[in-house]
Image (spheres, grey):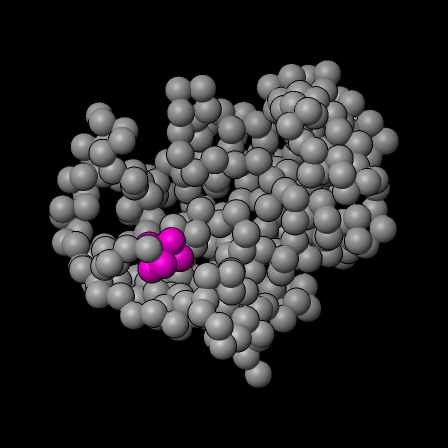
Amino acid sequence: MGGAVVRRLLRRGHEVRALVRDPARAGPLADLGGVELVPGSLQEEAPLAALMAGAEAVVHLVGIIAETRRQTFEAVHVGGTAGIAAAARAAGVGRMVHMSALGARADAGATAYHRTKAAGEEVVRTSGIPHVILRPSLIAGAGSVPLRMMIDMVRLAPFVPVVGDGLYRLQPVWLDDVAEVFALAVERPDLGGTFEIAGADSLTWNEMLDAIEAALAVSRRRVHVPVGVVRFAAHAGMALPNLSPISPDQLRMLLEGSTAGRNAIEGVFGVRPRRFADVVREMCAPYAPAGVSSASAP
């Protein structure tokens, strides 16, 4: 998401300063031109102060989808956001655009991911800085790990495993559409508050697989794996990390689905979202047989 937002801001004439762990490994950003790289982390005050100096707005995109011993949801989503907000406030930054997630909420029954995303939102709301909080759904495009996994399974596996009935719904949104929304949130002082951002299509997992199969011109047998079996494997994977590709919380979020009750992408931001089938055709084009078009549908 970071690279897409930086490219969009540059295209719209902004000067960009980016916090990076190691400038030597941030070549693609440096190669864009017009990007100043600040080495450091969310836990270091001096780099954050350098990042904010003279800035008119800050865009905060940092998040994780799985915890490690060094990075927890609480440390990244809450502590990291608090550090960014404090540095921005001290530097007099006039606007903050914060990336949360669709489904973020403080409910006791929510996953740790969603609870800490909600806590991070509250840090922004109470920061005293004019702000926009964006809650994207599943982001589709280059670098999307879940979508890449689905495409590779359909391409390479003789059959495709599906958790449960595959009827849980998602509303994937194209990477560049999200980047455009972030740029508009930076530029429009009239906008403030929290907005859900999702794509044009609310699709079941099965329908997403249908679109991928159509883009690749293949048909794969689907094996529906009982939820209980996947849940057992997910919990076992916590003890044996290589046993299961999904955590218990990730399983719960998958089954919960991710669709927008009030999608702001077009009504508020004026961005007409790209159709999921078009995004998938583009991503699958290098692997599709000759004659299968990667062009957008009418």
Give residue 197's quadrant in the image: bottom right
Asked if the stretch drawn in magenta spans residue 151, the answer is yes
Q: What residue is drawn where x is 38% and y is 53%?
A: 152
What is the tally of numbered marks visible in this picture? 0
Q: Is residue 246 visible?
A: yes
Asked if the stretch drawn in magenta spans residue 69, the answer is no
Query: Which x, y percent locates residue 215?
Result: 44, 70
Q: What residue is drawn where x is 51% and y is 65%?
A: 285
- Viewer-proximal residue, 33 or 78? 33
Query: Which x, y percent locates residue 201?
Result: 46, 70
Q: Is residue 173 visible?
A: no
**The magenta segment:** 150-155
Query: Which x, y percent locates residue 257?
Result: 35, 57
- Viewer-proximal residue, 158 or 43? 158
Q: Which part of the image, by quadrant, shows the C terminus?
A: bottom right
Residue at the front extreme of this rendering: 290
Q: What residue is drawn where x is 86% and y is 31%?
A: 54
Left-right relation of 31 to 4:
right
Left-right relation of 155 to 48:
left
Left-right relation of 157 to 60:
left
Query: Which x, y percent locates residue 33?
Result: 82, 40
- Viewer-proximal residue, 227 or 35? 35
Q: What residue is drawn where x is 75% and y is 35%?
A: 30
Q: Main secondary structure of the magenta part?
A: helix
Give residue 45's quadrant in the image: top right
Give residue 29's quadrant in the image: top right
